Amino acid sequence: MADKQDVKVSEKINDEEEDDIEVNGVEENIDESAKSKKKRKKRKKKKVGEEEPENAPDEIDEILNQLKLQDQKDTPTVNGVEDGDGKKKKKNKKKKAGEEGSESKEVNGEIAEEKEDGGKKKANKKKKGGAPTQQTTPPTIPISDLFPNGNFPEGEVCEYPIPQDMRGAKDRSTDEEKKALEKAQYYLYEEVRQAAEAHRQTRQYMKSILKPGMQMFDICETLEGTARKLINEKGLEAGLAFPTGCSLNHCAAHYTPNAGDKTVLQYDDVCKIDFGTHVNGHLVDCAFTLTFNPKYDELLKAVKDATNTGIRESGIDVRLCDIGKSIQEVMESYEVELDGKSYQVKSIRNLNGHSVSQYRIHAGKTVPIVKGGEATRMEEGEFYAIETFGSTGKGVVHDDMETSHYMKNFDVGNNVAVRVAKSKQLLQVINQNFGTLAFCRRWLDRIGQTKYLMALKNLCDVGIIDPYPPLCDIKGSYTAQFEHTILLRPTCKEVLTRGDDY
């Protein structure tokens, strides 16, 4: 911006001298009368900035106005906006097609460049609501890159059932107040949907490569490596929610191979693949059963049907015991024939579903899979892992085999006193890498921990870390599992992890 210029009026006592007034090089000579000394004394007392003498020529005002107009014309602009205080902003005129150079345009919130011929280059990201970029094989593109607008696929949406005691709100799907509550939870819903999509794509890939002869250790490493890429693992902000369970046959849950485990997947095995993902601690827990021999089809059908029954019966104000009763009725209506002998499929009564919350896989409420459970009710806004286990054995599991799963006690703080130096160091590593999420020995090996077994045992003995050994029915029996995570939204029930496979 041009500098402002002052009008100076010079006065001298000598009657023969002239006063010069200069404005941007324009001089006006004003002759002063030497007749009156009083007038000259008054002019000397006036300060700079006071009114012009009454006999000052009008041309000075015109010159000042011209200077102001010239200043506005000379003001530099940046992107069409004047660079000065108090100046009115101007917009750039659009370039015509065919002009040299390129210009940026906004297309549905994304930036695209305009070519010289007037055409548009492909936007950096897909348009809002458009089809996502296609995933690679094997999957390597993070889910957040596939859906850059942050709108992740919604799970299966279901209407709420009317509870057996007829208690519950009606017409939730059209209630404006409930819709407003959902809008307030938008970012939470999108985070858990992102985790669910990572789970779907990971299991879809794993199903395409799993075959007899693969080592269980390699299966878990491949699955977890894929999930880490898709969820874009970043410390405790995003990653795996717990170790991959790959329990075989009579082992129903909590088995994952430790270092040196050479177990191989066989054609006649019944393998439960159970893993979870999370974004900012908002996690999904989902599992399926893998078999190669078709003789187990009826067993898988029974457990899948029971899980879907539990999902269908779940809802706001529904009693947990009513869900368990319905699950057991469906599960035990099936029979499976193995090697010429029939077995009734039994619900494993000391295994159950559970509520989940942020950074907490077991949040306090349990969903039984047999009758006679608690009369506690489900509530609006809660997340639940609805899982069922069917067995050809006794229908009861017990601790067995070598422990691989561990998890910090959620009620223990980070500043707990630990006397053993090695245990204290290991606890710091656990807090930094896993927090209150479950972990396994393989994960400690992965981050460079060595000779930690005694320290880990010490943390378990003092109650800071809880061990979760494998849970097994009688040897020779076969167990199956299916599981989904559901969200009890204010207007409807959403099965977050539902996919085309199950």
Image (tube, rainbow, N blue to C red):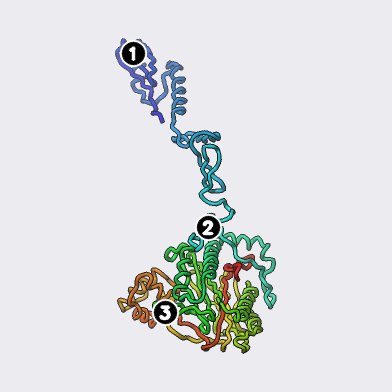
Instruction: Find numbered disc 3 in the image and state the secondary structure of the residue it sits on.
Output: loop
**Which quadrant is the C terminus positioned in?**
bottom right
- The picture places residue 473, in percent across and down from the top left corner, at 53, 86
Residue underneath mark 2 = 146
In the image, residue 363 sits, relative to residue 232, either above or below, namely: below
In the image, residue 480 sits, relative to residue 448, either above or below, namely: below
Residue underneath mark 3 = 261
Residue 488 visible in this rendered orientation of the protein: no
* Residue depicted at 60% across the width and 81% down the height: 295
Instruction: Find numbered disc 1 in the image and state the secondary structure of the residue it sits on.
Output: loop
Q: Which labelled disc corresponds to residue 18?
A: 1
Measure the alpha-carbon separation of dots 1 and 3: 108 Å
Q: Which labelled disc corresponds to residue 400?
A: none
Measure the alpha-carbon separation of dots 3 and 2: 36 Å
Residue in front for this viewpoint, 275 or 494: 275
Task: Say which label, 1 or 2, has the lower sequence index.
Answer: 1
Is there a contact, CB below 8 Å, between mark 1 and mark 3?
Answer: no
Residue 433 horizontal side relative to residue 101, left or right: left
